[in-house]
Amino acid sequence: MKTIKPICRGQLSFIHPLVTTTAFFFLTILFTTNIMAQEKSQMVRLAKIKVDALQLEKYNAALKEQMTTAIRVEAGVLTYYAVADKKDPTSITILEIYADTAAYNSHITTPHFLKYKATVKNMVTSLELVDVTLIASAKKEGMESSTQ
Amino acid sequence: MKTIKPICRGQLSFIHPLVTTTAFFFLTILFTTNIMAQEKSQMVRLAKIKVDALQLEKYNAALKEQMTTAIRVEAGVLTYYAVADKKDPTSITILEIYADTAAYNSHITTPHFLKYKATVKNMVTSLELVDVTLIASAKKEGMESSTQ
C-alpha cells in the first residue's frame, strides 16, 4: 500500500522566484491591455440640450430618473453627468459614457429610456449630440453617484 | 470591598428599540444633510478649449499631467473629465468639480497648475469657462480614474 506524502512548505521552493515574477509581469500586461481595450471601445458623448423654461423642473426630474435607472439596471451604461449653465439653467450638457456602441444601441430601446423620451418630447427645444473621445478622467474615490 | 458586577447582555434591554430607531433616524438626516451641504458648495465648471492642431499631442500630455497631479495632491480637487470632439479633436471640453470656491482658488496657485498654464500658453487658441450646476451624476462603481 502506497503512503501519501503531504506536501510540505519547503517543497514548493522549486517554484523559482523568477517564474513568479514573470507570471506576475504577464498577468499585469494582460490585465492592463484588457482595461485599455475596454476603454478604447467605450462610446462617449456630449448631449447639448435646450429645455423650455416653463417645464425645466419636470425635465430635470425626468432626466434624473432616466439616468439613475439606466446606471442601476444596464450593465453597459457606465457614467452620466448632467450640468446646467448657471447663467441659463435651460442650457443643459450631459456627459454620457457607455461600454460600447452595442450598449448604447441596447440602451435606447429600454423602457426607462423610451419613457424619458416620451415624457420630454415637448420639453426639449433643441438637441445636439456630439461624439467625443475621452482624453483622460481623474476622480477622488467615493464619488460614485449624486443628485442635487 | 465592593464587587464589580459585569454588565450582562440582558441588562442592555432597557435601551428601548424606539430610542435606537430615533437615534438612527436623526443620524441619517444629519449624514444626508451633510452630504447635501457638501454638494451644494461644490464648484462645477465646463472649460471649452481650442488647441493649435500642430501642438495637440503636447497639449493633451500637459493636460493629463495637470489633472492627475491635482487629483492626487489636492484634497479639494474632486473630478475631471476631458473629452475631445471626434470630428475636431482640437475642440476640447473639460468637466471640473472642486469641493468649493476656496479649493479652486487654492488650485490655481499650485505649482502643477502654474506649470500647466505656462506650458500650454502658446498652444491654446481660445478658452471659455462656463460655470454650471450639477443637476445629477450617476456612475458604475470602480470608475475612479482612467486615461487613454
Image (cartoon, coloured by chain):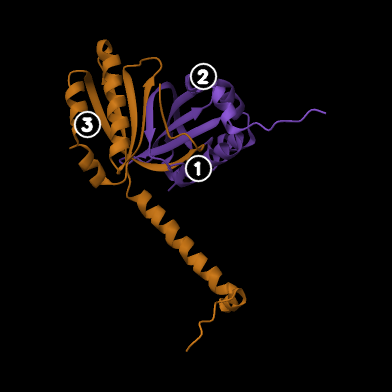
Chain colours: A purple, B orange
Question: Which residue, given by chain and number where applicable, does mark 2 sit on?
Answer: A19
Q: Position of residue B38 (x, y in %)?
A: 36, 51
Asked if labels 3 and 1 share a chain, the reply is: no
| Residue at mark 2: chain | A
Q: Which mark is residue A64?
A: 1
Marking on residue B112? 3
Q: Position of residue A32 (x, y in %)?
A: 47, 22
Q: Say left or right for A43 vs B126.
A: right
Q: Determine whether the residue tagged by mark 2 lies in a helix, strand or loop.
A: helix
Q: Residue lying farthest bottom?
A: B1
Q: Closest to the observer: B28 or B94?
A: B28
Counting from the top left corner in percent of width and height, residue A35 is at 49, 23
Relative height, residue B58 to residue B37 (above, below) = above
Q: Going 57% across and 79% down the picture, which residue do you hit?
A: B14
- Residue B68: name its quadrant: top left
In the image, what residue occupies the spot 41% across and 40% down? A141
- Give the residue type at disc 3: His
Q: CA distance from mark 2 to mark 1?
A: 51 Å
